[in-house]
Amino acid sequence: MLLDDIFDRLDSERVERIVELVQGEEFGQIFITDTDRQHLTEILKPNDGAKIFHVENGRIQ
């Protein structure tokens, strides 16, 4: 599932609820894109198995 720039359209409470819903195993891989790393850092917890990648100029940093 791809959630593209959901922080732009939804408030943080709704985004957090969506992330909680899709963290279950029935969803498989979830890709969330955003231009502000802080949003992802606030919502995703390190122990959730989430990995955050920073892409700049087409390269993973």
Image: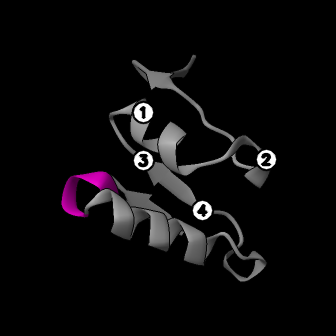
* Helix, strand or loop under label 3: strand
14 lies left or right of 8: right
Distance, label 3 to label 2, CA atoms, is 19 Å
* Eye-nearest disc, 3 or 2: 2
Q: How many marks?
A: 4
Question: As displayed, is residue 43 above or below residue 16?
Answer: above
* Residue denoted by label 3: 33
* Eye-nearest disc, 1 or 3: 1
Expressed as whole percent of the image width and height from the top left, the position of residue 21 reads 57, 78
* Quarter where residue 27 is shown: bottom right
Distance, label 4 to label 1, CA atoms, is 18 Å
* Residue denoted by label 1: 38
* Residue denoted by label 4: 30
Bounds of the magenta segment? 6-10
Label 4 crowding class (10 Å Cα cut-off): few <14, some 14-19, many 20+? few
Label 2 crowding class (10 Å Cα cut-off): few <14, some 14-19, many 20+? few
Distance, label 1 to label 2, CA atoms, is 17 Å
Which of marks 1 and 4 precedes in the sequence?
4
Query: What amino acid type should be assigned to the residue bearing mark 3?
Result: Thr
Q: Residue at x 49, y 42 (%)?
A: 42
* Residue denoted by label 2: 47
